[in-house]
Image (cartoon, rainbow, N blue to C red):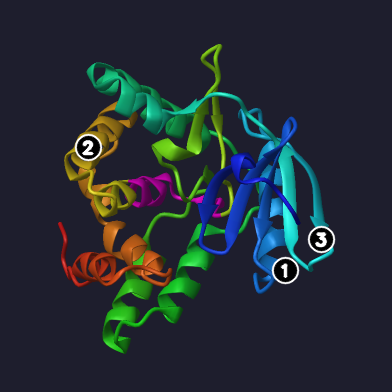
Amino acid sequence: MLYQKDQVIATRPKKVIYREGDTVVKLFSPDYSKASVLNEALNQARVEETDLHIPKIHEVFKTAAGEWAIRSDYIEGKTLQELMDENPDKKDEYLKQFVALQMEIHTKRAPLLTKLKDKMHRKISDSKFEATIRFELHTRLEGMPKHKKVCHGDFNPTNIIITPDGTPFIIDWAHVTQGNASADVARTYLWMVLNGQEEQAKQYLKLFCKMSDTAIQYVQNWMPIVAASQSVKENSEDDFALLSRWVNVVDYV
């Protein structure tokens, strides 16, 4: 599909996101899995059935060049990350809003979503870690409490758009599952660490645990499991080394 450079909102590996009128098109590369595209659209449609503020999907289509694409609402505004960068004096306020929004997501239910535990078992099996470590991770994962909360799977300040009237919209639901909220929190923590925001990650974790009355150790128990699942993605050598250090913690608590 043809588009002008000034239409591009963001680029990701094997994806281009661009604006077309009052909609946004996420265009996938020709070698991108059709099943993954359709699953992402289905996941977002299922989350639409909650009352969360998210962009609504208009269509899934295929271009003449053979590329799959998802069209959804364009949400005008700035990302929470942009607001944090532009207003460092309000960072604490924004971080509280960030945590409150994640806690709101965790109050929702979408029973047809993939189960978080099932997805993580698959990713641990696909990881490069030796069999002994994989066995330990599978065992640890299986012993975690089973919950059915909506978990975004990639909740970070770049995936929240604040509209001019102050309404927060949550975008990028490609990795959403249903499961234990603390796994979602561990994922956000690791995202911040991998993006060089270690101090903010610590502040975020303490704030989330305080606001949700969750023991920090409970979230930390998820860190090796989540790190292993993230290691399956295309990471830099430095990122993989950091994730490996988390994975190789035998008794974190």
Eyeballing the image, is 236 above or below 105? Answer: below
**Which part of the image, by quadrant, shows the N terminus?**
bottom right
**Real-space Cα separation, disc 2 to disc 1, in angstroms:** 37 Å
**Real-space Cα separation, disc 3 to disc 2, in angstroms:** 40 Å
Name the front one of labels 1 and 3: 3
Which region is colored magenta? 175-188
* Residue 88 visible (yes or no): yes
Q: Is residue 132 magenta?
A: no
Eyeballing the image, is 202 above or below 239? Answer: above
Between residues 219 and 171, which one lies in front from this camera angle? Answer: 171
Numbered circle sitting on residue 62: 3
**Real-space Cα separation, disc 1 to disc 3, in angstroms:** 10 Å
Eyeballing the image, is 193 above or below 82? Answer: below
Please report whichever mark, 1 or 3, sits nearer to the chain's N-terminal start.
Answer: 1
Name the element at disc 2: helix
Residue 135: x %, y % from top left:
33, 81
Can you identify the residue that label 2 sits on?
A: 200
Between residues 190 and 247, which one lies in front from this camera angle? Answer: 190
* Amino acid on which the number 3 mark rests in the picture: Lys
The 10 Å Cα crowd at callout 3, few under 14, some 14 to 19, many 20 or more, is some
